[in-house]
Each structure stands twice: as structure tokens, then as C-alpha cells.
Image: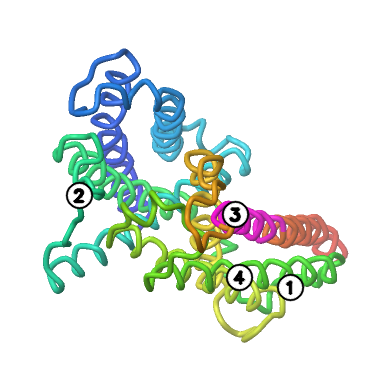
Amino acid sequence: MRRKDDVVRGAAAGVAMAATVPYLTLKVLWLAGCEVGVRDSGAMDKLWLLNLLTFGMDAIALALALAFVRPWGWRAPAGLVAFPMWVATGLLGTILVALPVSMVAGLVLGPEHRTPEQPADEGLAGWVFTLVYGGFSVQGVALITAFVLYARRRWAGLLRDRIGDLPDSPTRNVQRAFVGVSALVALGVAVARVYWAAGGTTGLPLRWVEQRTRAVATMDAVTAVMAVAAAGALLVLVFRVGPGRRLRVPLVVAWTAAGSLFAWGAWQLVAFGSSTTVPDLPSAVPGLMVLVEAGQVVAGVLILAVGAMALTERAAAAAAAAQALPAVESRG
């Protein structure tokens, strides 16, 4: 079984690495001043820093894929692997959910009617979107597959545990306080995102309303679902709901959904946040979009903190049990 997993993990990591090449190549060309696939020659000058940032993000995904198949990947500190993979799962996993939903909506509802203020190309050739999001989809499936097999081998005990196996926590009250705050923040994020997904415009800058597409509404809806799922899964873990159930299900849900909240909230703050505070709508609430994006980051960080405390305590309890076992056997 392990041999089969190793083969699949190696193949998935190879596909993930290959899937980064087109995107990285495109970013290198844009950073070098080449305007391949660009219809607005001035756009790349304004986006140079963002292009550099996204190049670095995809380069990290390439390094993660290597870590899942190279010997040094097993020796790397857990946090050095887990944190960037948590962010990558949030970014790529959300695309894997939103893209098919958006495609099905297009098939059912037909092409979108665009006003003159809604450019279909947004300054880029159509093939660029196919290359980028097609690559992200392949990369997401392959990278997450490789990570699941890597985690199943490196942290096998964790995935076999049941919710009731989590040790009594000396930080239980702190964890519950964090859970309460994160749940309230996540609920606020969900309400705002559902409102925008349904066509609401309060809090959105005028140019966002004019250029709003079905794909953006789908992302809002998916983010709302992620917010509810992250809070719900964390409540199950911290309050030990259903102690006989496997730990891996709520753990995977909390991991993916919280990663989505944090990663997309942080990305939107960096890419758009400072430009969405201008109240250029009569009904706009200044800074509401930034507040929602910041709420996603806060909820994600709180969930990450709770998870880190719980898993650190579990590892400490397991290590203590392992040290006590030889002493018990020697007395026996």
C-alpha cells in the first residue's frame, strides 16, 4: 500500500510542478517587460509588484511539490511545510470549488450580458485566463493529492484519531474564547458575502459594481460557505462534538475552509484593499469591503491559532506517553 502511495504521490507532485511552468513563464515575461497576452500596455507597469508577488507564490507551490517527494521534505519542520500548504490549499481549493460552479452556471444561465463598462478581457487576451485558471486547477488537484499522501505518512496517527482522543487542554478556555470570536467574525463575513453574491451593492465601489461578473458573485458565495464551514468544524473540534467520530473530517474541513478565508482575504487586501475604501457609490459604506477582507484574515488566524495549540498539546501528550511506555514495560 505504501509503495502504491509513493508512486501516486510522486506522480502528483510531478504534475503539480509541471503545472506551475506556464504561469511562472508568463510572470517572468511580464516582469521582464514582454507584453505577451496583454492588450493594455500600461496595465503591466501598474501591476509589476503584484506580478512579482504572484510569481513568488507559485514558486513556493513548486517548492512544496518538491518537498513532498524529496528526502529533505520529511526532515523539514512541520510548520515550514504546513503553513504555506495551508495557504495554498485555501487559494487553490477555493478555485477548484468556484470554477466548476461558475462553469455550470454559465451552461445553465447562458452567456452573461455585459455593459460597455464590463470589459470581457480586462486588458488580457482570452487565452491567458484559460492558461492561468486551467493551470491552477491542475496544480490544485495535483498538489493537494501529493500533500494528502505526504500527510497520511508523516502524520498517520493524527488522521487515525477520533475527536474524543484529543487530550484535555490546559488552554481550553483560551481556545473556546478564540472559537467564539472567530465564529462571530466568520458569520459577519458570510452575511456580507451572501449579500454581495445575491446582487447587493452596499459597500462596493462604483467600478466594482459596473464590472461585477457572475464569477465574482460565485466567489462571494463560495467564501460565505467557507466561513460557515470553518466556524462549524472548529466548534466540533474544540467542544468535542461527537467524540467517537474520526478527527480527520472536521480537521480537513477546518483546514481547507480557514485556509480559504485567510488566503483570499489576505490576497484581496494586498491586491485591492487600499483602492476599495473610496466611497464612490451613493450607498457605499467606506471601508466595508476592506473590513470584510480583514475579517476573513482575522477569522483564519484565530482558527490557525486554535489548531496550533490543540495539535501542539496532542504532540506533547503523545511524546509523554511514548516516554512513559519503556518505564512501564521495564517494571513489568
Q: Which residue is mark 1?
A: 180
Residue at x-position 27% and y-position 29%: 21
Q: Which residue is mark 3?
A: 286
Please provide percent x and percent y for residue 207.
38, 49
Q: Which residue is mark 2?
A: 116
Q: Earlier in the sequence, mark 4 or mark 1?
A: 1
Amino acid residing under circle 3: Pro
Q: Earlier in the sequence, mark 3 or mark 1?
A: 1
**Labelled disc at residue 140:** none
Q: Earlier in the sequence, mark 2 or mark 1?
A: 2
Label 3 – label 1 distance at C-alpha: 27 Å
Q: Which residue is mark 4?
A: 188
Graded by Cα atoms within 10 Å as few (under 14), some (14 to 19) or many (20 or more), the crowding at tag 4 reads: some
Q: Residue furthest front?
A: 282
Q: Main secondary structure of the magenta part?
A: helix
Element on which disc 3 rests: loop
Label 3 – label 2 distance at C-alpha: 26 Å
- 3 or 1: mark nearer the eye: 3
Near-viewer residue (160 or 130): 130
